[in-house]
Amino acid sequence: MSVKLNPAAVRFAKQLIQAGKFKNDAGHWREHNPDTAAENKFLDRHEIEEYAQWHLGEDTTLGEDTKGRYKFPFGDFKTVHRDGLLAAKERAAQQGYHDIERAADELEQLLEKQAAK
């Protein structure tokens, strides 16, 4: 699998965090990660490019117009979730995607800094 960092998603996440659109949750990402039905509902109302913004990685071997191309989600299509960033960072580290791991770590630090204000 050829997964690379999605720079547009990193910029988007930074904008959301700086605008205060985040949840500094300490729960489990599986409780907040949108399921297939929520993803499909989002795609019914939005373009695939907007869906892609919510994922730190993309598999360049898959078509740009497919959900499967986009990996490492970090939010619920409304807000960035701290536990989503932690999950992305952990999975990226396990799978050897160090650029995605670093981006998730930087976003988590930014979120924590904003939360402390």
Image (cartoon, rainbow, N blue to C red):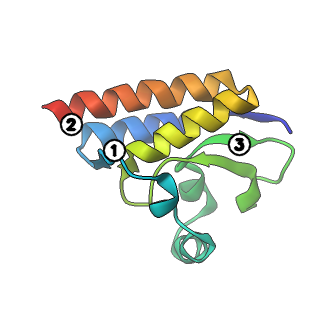
Image quadrant in which you'd find residue 83 = top left
Q: Nearer the viewer, residue 83 or 57?
A: 83
Distance between mark 3 and mark 1 Cα atoms: 20 Å
Q: Amino acid at mark 2?
A: Ala
Circle number at residue 58 = 3
* Image x and y of residue 115, in percent: 21, 36
Give the residue at mark 1.
16
- Name the residue at 29% across, 44% down: 24
At a point 58% along the width and 64% down the height, the residue shown is: 47
Quick one: quadrant of the N terminus? top right
Q: Residue at x 83, y 35 (%)?
A: 2
Identity of the amino acid at label 3? Glu
Q: Earlier in the sequence, mark 3 or mark 2?
A: 3
Lateral position of residue 1 relative to residue 30, left or right: right
Residue assigned mark 2: 115
Label pair 3/2, CB-CB below 8 angstroms: no
